[in-house]
Image (tube, grey):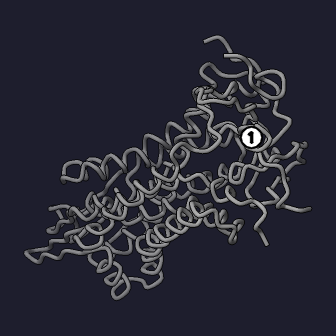
Amino acid sequence: MNATTLPRARDAGLIGCHVCGMVCRAVSGDAVVACPRCGSTLHARKPASYARTWALLIAALLMYIPANVLPIMRTASLGDVDDNTILSGIVELWVKGSPGLAVIVFCASIMVPTLKFLALGTLLITSRRGSAWARRQRTQLYRAVELIGYWSMLDVFVVALLTALVRFGLFSLVEPLPGVVFFGLTVVLTMLASMCFDPRLIWDGQEDSDE
Amino acid sequence: MDARLLPRAHDAAPTLLICEHCDAVYARRPLARGEVAECARCGAVLERGRGMSIDTLLALIVTALLVFVQATVWPIVTLGLNGQHVAATLWDVVHMMWLDHSQVVAVIAGMTLYVFPLAKILILGWLLVFARQGTRAPGFRFLMVTLRRIGPWTMSEVFVLGALVSIVKAHLYFDVVADPGIYAYAALMFLITIFAGVDLTRLWDETRGEAAA
């Protein structure tokens, strides 16, 4: 089985519906055509994929800076006030609580977003250049980004749950601080960015330069 | 709009498959139970063979609904200090974030933990009730599209892990009691994992004709 010579929908004049998978015949021109089965608009490629993905990725990156610099949570107990950033929260968990859980939070809050930025950036640049390098692996990278991206919301839920639990009745208080809002937005924006990227762009460009 | 589709009619199952990730075209062939068609070029899953029957799926969805109601109604965790106790439900979580100047987080949490998961369960239940007879529920097209759109935005399983982290953190200062809500959430997480392996596009092929609204 020669995987590189498989027919491509675009060359065969076909479009697969993004939403329901229906196979439709492409029409020439700029006419907007809806999928006959599910009614969604048909695109050979996601519209303005590069521009949208870049825009959302850069917006996410801008949000990611205050998300890390600003504290995300304030713990106040009998006059003792303690502000935690994402990183200091992980350190606290490591030192006082359980190192295993600290590793999980580190992966979800620091590693996953960072890798997501790097991965999407790499995909955008290499696809734009029509690179034939590791196409299959790059597609797998995209799937990995889609699969694990939303786990970054972990820290946001932790702050929300602790805020709801720890109230004045316990002579202490947990408050969310602006960092957590920026972090939540970062996660949402990176999710939108990866949805706007069209992995088929990885396979466009010079066709026969594969190994 | 004229019919620009392959093969002949709206209702017929497509005889071709196009890979979502690399645009490769394949002739579709029937899959045995549990079989998965993978793209030879990029490795994406093209289609999964029918695993469970519609009845089984419906039973699981009803279970999921019951478990989801438990998970949202019951408190998740109780904290205690010097004989005082505070418990929180999912609603408290969303409500407190709203009051504490983090409305953005409140909206994200409310949507991903409450609105979208509930919508997903109710829509699937509705579609499956009709699919048992091989018919399409009223609003089938719209609901199938909605289901697909909200798919990535349900985060109950992340919340379970978040609750675990919260318990460990709170345990440094308080007595922590896990409440029924967290067990319901764990069960929900298990059900979500089962549904992750179900290919719902089969509903397009297995049902005919939209029922009158």
Q: In the image as oriented, which residue stretches furthest toward the left?
A: A79
The x, y position of residue A141, in whole percent, is: 62, 67
Q: Is residue B62 above or below residue B157?
A: above
> Residue, x 57% and y 37% (percent of image)?
B147
> Residue, x 29% and y 72% (percent of image)?
A68
Foreground pick, A35 / A91:
A35
Quickly name the residue at label 1. Answer: B56
Q: Can the viewer see residue B78?
A: no
Q: Is residue B124 above or below residue A152?
A: above
Count of numbered tags: 1
> How many C-alpha atoms fall within 10 Å of the one at disc 1: few (<14), some, or many (≥20)?
few
Task: Report which quarter residue A165 is drawn in.
Answer: bottom left
Foreground pick, B13 / A75:
B13
User: Is residue B171 shown left or right of residue A28?
Assistant: left
Q: Is residue A141 above or below residue A26?
A: below
> Residue, x 43% and y 49% (percent of image)?
B113
The x, y position of residue A71, in whole percent, is: 22, 71
Foreground pick, A48 / B35:
A48
Which kind of residue does numbered mark 1 sit on? Thr
**Image quarter of the C terminus of chain A:** bottom right
Task: Report which quarter residue A69 is drawn in.
Answer: bottom left
User: Is residue B211 shown left or right of residue B48?
Assistant: left
The x, y position of residue A106, in whole percent, is: 43, 77
> Residue, x 56% and y 58% (percent of image)?
A146
User: Is residue A205 shown left or right of residue A169?
Assistant: right
The x, y position of residue B212, in whole percent, is: 65, 11
